Amino acid sequence: MNENRQDDLENKIRSLAEEFPYPQTPDIAGNFDWGKSGSRRRFLQPRQLVWIGILLIVLISSLVAVPEVRARLLEFLQIGAIRIQITEPTQTSTASPVPGAAIAPPTATPGFDSNLVSVLDLDGETTLEELRGQAEFPVYLPTYPINMGEPDRVYYQQLDEQSFVVLVWLYPDTDDEIWISLYALGQGTGGLKGEPEVIEEVEVNGSRAIWTDGPHLFVIDGFFQVGRLVESPVLIWTVDGLTYRLEADMSKAEMIRIAESLK
């Protein structure tokens, strides 16, 4: 729900609350027969319970309409094992950043070490063959684009029961220009993203996914040395209990197509 629709809904709720024909306050005490022993023998009538329920709904809706309360209720957006930090209600938007518009620097995350400036600085570099013998989960590759081939760099890190894989494809004839990076987080491994400029719910193979755009900080739980600033669009989705994270400077449609080709 975008901000305008959210505001419209809040205004409607407030308007309905003001015009709502509240019934006369029920005589709650009079509905109890205390008897000689002082014990209650009667309860509220069903019709009165309905009115109380309506009043509670209106009250809760009014509270959620307050920005401070709503922000506390929506501090994180969860997709698979990755939590996206948010300070405002989630905006589902297809709008792109305005060219030339100033972008505020991302907010730092407590415990976040952003010294890692590139995925290529990761520890644990290995080969695809060795990775498939080490990882406790299957490692799949995209089959789109058709000329993608195997990754140029492969990384695997494990800490106790947490582990993740990063596959990196470089632009042709370059040694350090990243084209696509694909993360696979094993079960029990989580990640935290700062708030990107755009957050949009999409689908990958019919299942819920999240696409984001805009600079933000990203860290994998327990692996604080891999924290870094992300500036490219990101697509996050889940398959068979694994959380995948695709990062590439390309369109949303192309990223979804890559994700759906994973085999």
Image (cartoon, rainbow, N blue to C red):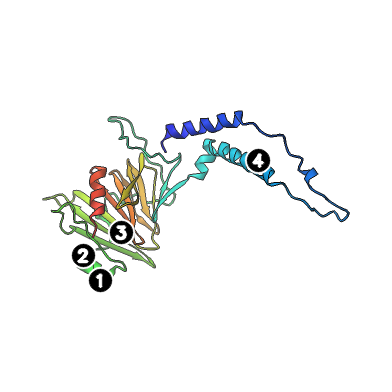
Q: CA distance from mark 4 to mark 3?
A: 50 Å
User: For the residue marked with disc 1, what is the amino acid?
Assistant: Gly
Mark linked to residue 184: 3
- Direction from residue 229 to residue 127 in the image, left or right: left
- Between 116 and 194, the one lying in front of the other is 194
Q: Is residue 92 above or below residue 191?
A: above
Element on which disc 1 rests: helix
On the question of residue 73 being in view, the answer is: yes
Position of the C terminus by quadrant: bottom left
User: For the residue marked with disc 2, what is the amino acid?
Assistant: Leu
Residue 23's spot in the image, x, y percent? 69, 34
Q: Residues within 10 Å of mark 4 (few under 14, many from 20)?
A: some
**Residue that appears at 21% across and 56% down:** 142
User: For the residue marked with disc 3, what is the amino acid?
Assistant: Ala
- 3 or 2: tag closer to the N-terminus: 2
Residue 134's spot in the image, x, y percent? 28, 70
Mark linked to residue 133: 1
Residue hosting label 4: 51
User: For the residue marked with disc 4, what is the amino acid?
Assistant: Trp
Element on which disc 2 rests: helix
Position of the N terminus by quadrant: top left
- Direction from residue 149 to residue 231 in the image, left or right: right
Q: Residues within 10 Å of mark 1 (few under 14, many from 20)?
A: few
Mark linked to residue 128: 2
Q: Is residue 85 above or below residue 190?
A: above
Q: CA distance from mark 3 to mark 1?
A: 15 Å
Between tags 4 and 3, which lies in front?
A: 4
Residue 260's spot in the image, x, y percent? 25, 53
Q: CA distance from mark 3 to mark 2?
A: 14 Å
